[in-house]
Image (tube, rainbow, N blue to C red):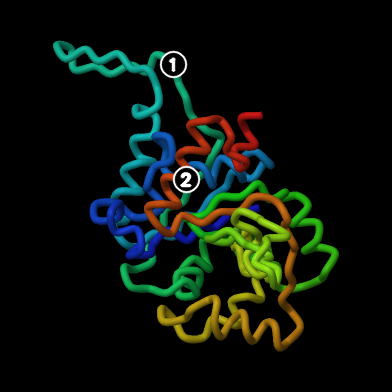
């Protein structure tokens, strides 16, 4: 099954990092977050990727074109003009890189990838968030539900600590960064049937999270797989630094492949 990854946005809220590279190429522990997302899918046996690029797409292309030399030991003979890979450190991935436009919206990018996805069930996620979601369990839920689209519902961590303050000023409960509001939000990690393309009617201007998903919900064709584990987007420099700290201290919950 193919895995499509939305990797073409501008990443304006992370402008400290995205002036020279797209957000999916911002690094966590020396590797792009895109690599971390792909490693997570690969852990579950999904290795066929379609990366939907846009803003600074050449940076993503260069990364994969030069992957072998970047992460392998090499011998370079400048006199004889010869390059030899001494130890190969690759991945079992097939990667299709599609340029889907600099200004194209999420649904428009997906629509442009229709032919590459082959008319079969596929997965889709965002190129700026990591999770320890159980992909086979997500897929099984989708198959059992009979829905056209299943998204992974998550509850984000709150930004501030929560207090329960009594009338006399005493605090009966303190919780640092509780689950925000207790509500569920769209965390990406979709499973989609080809029927999704029936809902992408506005070309490049189609925003997947608006009319298409709203119509699917009204039609009873949108489902939610609830994930209570780790999920974290990388929207700001603080998010990037927090994820990096987890990685550097070997406490990254999404790094299932390293356990």
Q: Nearer the viewer, mark 1 or mark 2?
A: 2
> Which part of the image, by quadrant, shows the C terminus?
top right
User: 10 Å neighbourhood of mark 2: few (<14), some, or many (≥20)?
Assistant: some
* Circle 1 residue: 87
- In percent of width and height, residue 126 lies at 51, 60
Q: In the image shown, does 169 or 111 lie closer to the viewer?
A: 169
Image coordinates of residue 170 in percent, x first then y, are 68, 62
Residue 3 shows up from this direction: yes
Name, please, the residue furthest toward the left. Answer: 79
Residue corresponding to mark 2 = 242
Furthest-right residue in this view: 144
Taking the spot 30% from the left edge, 55% from the top edge, the residue there is 18
Return the disc, 1 or 2, that comes first in the chain's sequence. 1
**Image height check: is 207 above or below 81?**
below
Q: Quadrant of residue 171?
A: bottom right
Callout 1: SS: strand
71 relative to 136 in the view: left or right: left
In-front residue for pair 65/106: 106
């Amino acid at each position: 099954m193919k895995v499509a990854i939305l990797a073409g946005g501008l990443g304006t809220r992370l402008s400290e990092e995205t002036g020279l590279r797209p957000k999916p190429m911002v690094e966590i522990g020396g590797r792009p977050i895109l690599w971390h997302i792909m490693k997570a899918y690969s852990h579950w046996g999904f290795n066929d990727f379609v990366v939907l690029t846009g803003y600074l797409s050449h940076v993503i292309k260069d990364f994969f074109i030069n992957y072998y030399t970047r992460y392998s030991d090499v011998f370079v003979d400048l006199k004889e003009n010869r390059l030899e890979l001494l130890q190969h450190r690759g991945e079992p991935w097939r990667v299709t890189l599609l340029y889907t436009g600099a200004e194209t919206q999420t649904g428009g990018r997906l629509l442009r990838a229709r032919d590459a996805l082959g008319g079969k069930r596929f997965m889709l996620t965002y190129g700026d968030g990591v999770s320890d979601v159980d992909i086979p369990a997500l897929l099984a839920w989708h198959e059992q539900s009979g829905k056209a689209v299943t998204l992974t519902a998550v509850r984000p961590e709150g930004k501030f600590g929560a207090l329960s303050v009594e009338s006399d000023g005493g605090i009966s409960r303190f919780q640092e960064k509780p689950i925000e509001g207790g509500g569920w939000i769209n965390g990406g990690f979709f499973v989609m049937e080809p029927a999704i393309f029936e809902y992408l009617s506005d070309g490049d201007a189609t925003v997947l999270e608006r009319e298409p998903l709203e119509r699917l919900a009204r039609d009873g064709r949108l489902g939610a797989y609830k994930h209570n584990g780790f999920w974290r987007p990388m929207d700001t420099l603080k998010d990037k630094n927090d994820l990096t700290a987890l990685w550097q201290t070997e406490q990254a919950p999404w790094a299932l492949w390293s356990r």
